[in-house]
Amino acid sequence: MMEKKYNISVEATLDVIGGKWKCVILCHLTRGAKRTSELKRLMPGITQKMLTQQLRELEEDGIINRITFNQVPPKVIYELSEYGWSLQGILNALCDWGERHIEKVYGDFDVLESSILNDHLLNKQPTP
């Protein structure tokens, strides 16, 4: 592995989970293992090529596990690895801040496309 130099530790975190899609993928995986097609459906704005690339990078960094079932047609699912679960606090904090931001800027959660996230917010206790 090539040695990297960071000026501040957050750079190392962003090196692994930075970008538009990785945190979104990880948040979906905190709700359970998913097939590629499920992730694509949950993230309609991502291209198949980008989804595949992001999944490979997360797998290479040890954040997710790719599980292949030996069947026809082949079945592949992705889940958080034990190391990936160590990001749960960060992901929860990002979601909580995003919810507060949406509420502040838009006043409600109608801007959220995903019914999964809307259902989550409806069942959540309000944050101070």
Image (spheres, helix red, strand yellow):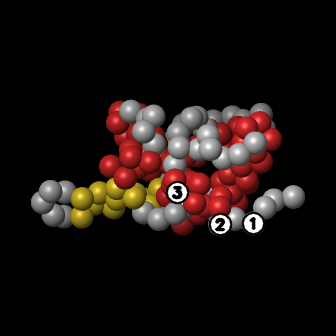
Residue 20 rendering spot, x and y as whole percentages: 57, 35
Image quadrant holding the C terminus, namely bottom right
The residues bearing labels 2 and 1 have C-alpha atoms spaced at a distance of: 7 Å
Q: For mark 2, what is the residue?
A: 123
What residue is shown at x 61% (from left), y 61% (from top)?
120
Q: Amino acid at mark 3?
A: Ile
**Vertical position of residue 43 compared to residue 85: above or below:** above
- Depth check, front residue: 122 or 31: 122
- Depth check, front residue: 96 or 23: 96
Labels 3 & 1 near each other (Cβ < 8 A): no
Q: Amino acid at mark 2?
A: Asn
| CA neighbours of label 2 inside 10 A, class few (<14), some (14 to 19), many (20+) | few
Sequence-wise, the earlier of marks 2 and 3 is 3
Q: For mark 1, what is the residue?
A: 125
Judge from the rendering whether residue 22 lies leftward or rightward of residue 37; answer left or right: right
Residue 2 rendering spot, x and y as whole percentages: 54, 37
Residue 98 rendering spot, x and y as whole percentages: 71, 45
